[in-house]
Image (cartoon, rainbow, N blue to C red):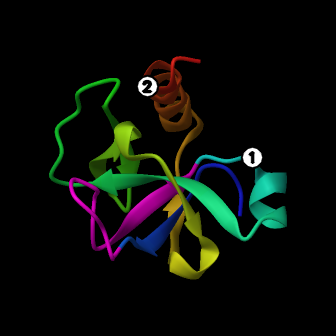
Amino acid sequence: MDRGDVYWVNLDPMQGSEIRKSRPCVLVGAAPINRARRTVVVVPLSTSAKARPPLTIAVQCLGKRVCAACDQIRAIDKARLQAPAGHLSKEDMEALDEGLRQILVL
């Protein structure tokens, strides 16, 4: 479970404006923490969102251009992870990191 790995994740049940259903999510937490804890920090990916940095960042996943919803970052239990779905490139992770820095004011 390395930073940048993408997994299919069951995000239901959701509340309010949270992203819902099963969708790919990218792990953004540090690998040692991902292995040590029962939770992981993820950013959901969406095919319907338009790239609007820093809220949504365009990345390549599953052979297509999708958007990482930086404003939907969340910790999830590993039980929500369904199946591996790839890994983001170094360039896409750098763009995602910049979006997260701006969203979280780091």
Vertical order, 57 against 13 (above or below): above
Q: Quick one: quadrant of the C terminus?
A: top right
In the displayed structure, does residue 68 sit left or right of residue 49? right
Q: Which mark is residue 45?
A: none
Question: In the figure, 86 relative to 92: above or below?
Answer: below
- Spot the residue most to the front: 16
Residue 18 at what x, y percent from top left?
28, 56
Picture residue at 48% right of the left edge, 36% below the top: 92
Q: Position of residue 63 (x, y in %)?
A: 34, 59
Quadrant for the N terminus, please: bottom right
In the image, residue 82 above or below residue 26 = below
Q: Is residue 7 above or below residue 101?
A: below
Question: Is disc 1 surrounded by few (<14), some (14 to 19) or many (20+) residues within 10 Å?
Answer: some
Q: Which residue is mark 1?
A: 30
Q: Nearer the viewer, residue 39 or 44?
A: 39
Which SS type dominates the magenta stretch? loop
Circle 1 — which element?
loop
Q: Which residue is mark 2?
A: 103
Disc 2, SS: helix
Q: Is residue 22 left or right of residue 78?
A: left
Magenta-colored span: 12-27
Residue under the point 51% across and 78% down: 80
- Which numbered disc flags the more N-terminal residue, 1 or 2? 1
Amino acid under label 2?
Ile
| Residue at x 28% of width, y 58% of height | 19
Q: Is residue 60 magenta?
A: no
